[in-house]
Image: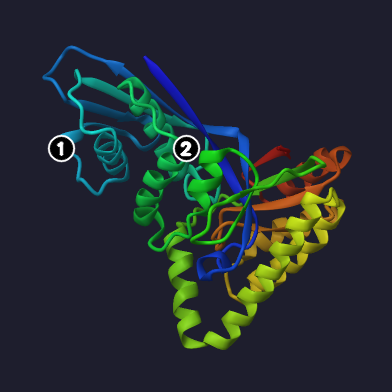
Amino acid sequence: MTTANAPGKIILFGEHAVVYGRPAIAVPVREVIATAEVTDITQTTQGEIRIEAPNIKLDKWLHVLNPDHPLAKIVHLTLHAIGSPKFPPLQLRITSTIPISSGLGSGTAVSIAVVRALSTHLGQPLPLHRQSALAFEVERIHHGTPSGIDNSVVTYDQPIYFVQGEEPEILHNETPFTLVIGDTGRTSPTAVAVSQVRRAWQEDTPKYEAAFEAIGQIASQARECLMEGRVQELGRLMNQNQTLLEDIGVSSPELRALIDAARASGASGAKLSGAGLGGNMIAMVDPDAADRVEIALREAGAVRTLRTEVST
């Protein structure tokens, strides 16, 4: 058996604006992971792969899946990348503790875990940049017009500063900091929110370009804060970013309730994370306030909370 993992992720700053060429910052969330296990089996012919993903109630042979199914797609891409070698029949089992459609990078993490497990099992492990590129192709299925930030941060498993079309910059933040993540329980496929914003941008380009530019400037300021160890300033920047995200219409009553609860219970800042319209929010907290903020989030309707320390 060959086993591989990939972490979840959150976007600290820059969601939506990153699709329009502005910078964004994302960090891994190692407390949740996707896992892929590849095992040789003997019940069938050479080159067959049985895919089992209990989280989505899937148990099928690769050849009967639609080639555009995300799991079939990443398997085919991986096999092609390593030269379509001959191999014995395989069982590919995929599990994940990352909530689906909540902004934590579930689909991306699954893709990266599959690439790692399958290529390694077949004796041709792929370098990180190739893993990221393959996962990006599957992101097109999940998100429609992805920026590339999700596959980059999940692959490299480090905080990154990202501009579309450029190599991601690993952020060596001098001072670790704590985030509390609150899940609204409302699933929100990224493609839906991205499409909504694109339609609005087409109808009122000057307004949305101004918002994207302001969001990008916040991400740039946050990068400097991280690099210089001024993490206490991140909360204020989160609040500014949230206001702009509300202006472009991607917040929701559920997100607003959790954000307000986090701020009222001691978080220095809070904002939605990811596509919005549901999913998760994040709060910047002092470690000694984390318990209090988590309790407040659950009382305000969060279906789950998660604490993570962001460090290089």
As drawn, the residue found furthest toward the left would be 45
Q: CA distance from mark 1 to mark 2?
A: 30 Å
Circle 2 Cα neighbour tier, 10 Å, few/some/many (<14 / 14–19 / ≥20):
few
Residue 300 visible to an observer of this rendering: no
Residue type of the residue flagged with mark 2: Leu
Q: Is residue 88 above or below residue 297?
A: above
- Report the residue marked by disc 2: 128
User: Label 2's element?
Assistant: helix
| Residue sitting at x 71%, y 66% | 241
**Label placed on residue 293:** none
**Is residue 280 at least partly visible in the picture?**
yes
Which quadrant would the C terminus be assigned to in this image?
A: top right
Residue 236 placement: quadrant: bottom right
Label 1: element kind: helix
For badge 1, the amino acid type reads Val
Q: Nearer the viewer, residue 110 or 281?
A: 110
What label does residue 64 carry, if any?
Answer: 1
252 to the left or right of 64: right
Can you say which quadrant of the picture contains the N terminus?
top left
Q: Position of residue 16 (x, y in %)?
A: 55, 66
| Residue 40 placement (x, y as % from top left) | 26, 15
Point 33% across, 21% down: residue: 123
Which of the 4 image quadrants contains residue 162? Answer: bottom right
The answer to which of 65 and 222 lies nearer the viewer is 222
Work out whether mark 1 precedes mark 2 in sequence or the reverse, and give the earlier one.
1
- Residue at (37, 30) in percent of width and height: 54
